[in-house]
Amino acid sequence: MKTLVLVNQKGGVGKSAIATVLAHYLAGLGLRVLAVDLDHQANMTKPLTLSGKAVVSSTTADKVLTDAAATVEVAPLVLLPSNSPTLLALERQPDRHTEFARNVRGFLRRMSTQFEVVIIDTNPNPDIRVVAALVSATHALSPIQLNQESLDGIRALFNHERVGVARIKERLNPHLEFLGMVPTMVENTPFQRRNMETLMGSSSYRERVMTMGGSDGRGEGGPFAMIPKRSVVAETQASGRYLPEIRNQTAARDAWREIEPVLRRVAHLLGVA
Ligand SMILES: Nc1ncnc2c1ncn2[C@@H]1O[C@H](COP(=O)(O)OP(=O)(O)OP(=O)(O)O)[C@@H](O)[C@H]1O
Ligand SMILES: [Mg+2]
């Protein structure tokens, strides 16, 4: 079983949008998918619930940390929904943090016969939820935005004392594989082009941007991954519709043509397709 955490302490970079569409996409490939919404903002819970395609579990996401015996319904696509007040309260129980992290590990181990992929959407604050997810995950992916504020945060993405991906890998989870940063909401403006050049100008950042491999999404290298800014993506987050199923809109078809290769690449890098 592969466990992918969407992580970036910067808010509003597209974590939940990618987590949602990826859950649909992987389930559409015939994989058994568990989506876990650790964010109290519930931005993956809303669209997956509205879509009608996921079984909304009676186990809320906080139970993954707090309940050593948490179980999940058997279905091809299951959502552990966000439970805001309880999720927010976890950080305020430091004496239980070790137990929380241990519970996540045990939970994922128990789920490994039931699901092939777990997608975890996280909150932007660097708290125990993010730590516990990263400590037991197999993979992490970081959507980033090409604005100055977001670029300033990249160093923290890797080196943040508590939730930096490199720090976690070094100290707590040597198996964690970073799939890369994926620029999202990309616009062809002079401002974003300049920021893209800044990003790519640093070799240590450039080598951490996800690449697309060959034309079939396999192999090494290839062009850099990116997801363009398309209003239809925001609309699908609000309505719960799955992008490729909006057939009567050219904008939706065009956006899907741009986004689907990135999802295929993620599936390949996860080793599930
Ligand atoms: N490619 C895109 N094109 C246009 N809008 C997008 C795109 N991706 C995401 N959005 C929209 O941008 C907003 C922020 O995205 P999202 O909620 O996925 O970010 P996030 O990183 O999960 O934020 P948070 O850190 O608050 O959890 C949402 O309204 C979402 O619908
Ligand atoms: Mg989010």
Image (cartoon, grey):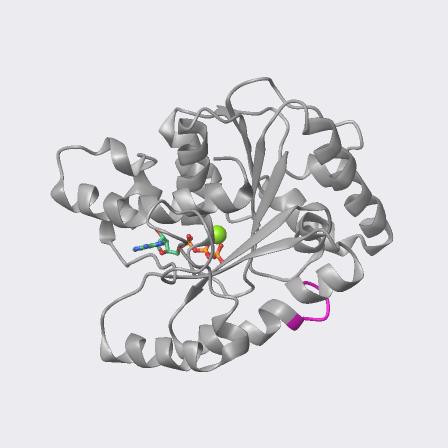
Query: Is residue 42 at all visible to an observer of this figure?
Result: no
Residue 171 horizontal side relative to residue 35, left or right: right
Q: Position of residue 131 (x, y in %)?
A: 70, 55
The front one of 211 and 95 is 211
Tell me, yes or no, whether the highlighted magenta stretch contains residue 160.
yes
Q: Position of residue 34 (x, y in %)?
A: 56, 31
Query: Is residue 143 at all visible to an observer of this figure?
Result: yes
- Split into quadrants, the picture shows ligand 1 in the one at bottom left
Q: Position of residue 73 (x, y in %)?
A: 61, 19
Main secondary structure found in the magenta portion: loop
Total marks shown come to 0
The image shows residue 57, relative to residue 260, as above or below, that is above
The image shows residue 132, relative to residue 209, as above or below, that is above
Location of residue 21 by image quarter? top left
Find the magenta span and give its range: 159-163
The front one of 58 and 155 is 155
Tell me, yes or no, whether the highlighted magenta stretch contains residue 178.
no
The image shows residue 181, relative to residue 49, as above or below, that is below
The front one of 261 and 254 is 261
Residue 71 horizontal side relative to residue 19, left or right: right
Identified at 59% across, 39% down, the residue is 83
* Residue that extends furthest to the right in the rendered view of this protein: 95
Q: Position of residue 130 (x, y in %)?
A: 65, 54
Residue 31 horizontal side relative to residue 254, left or right: right
Identified at 43% across, 38% down, the residue is 46
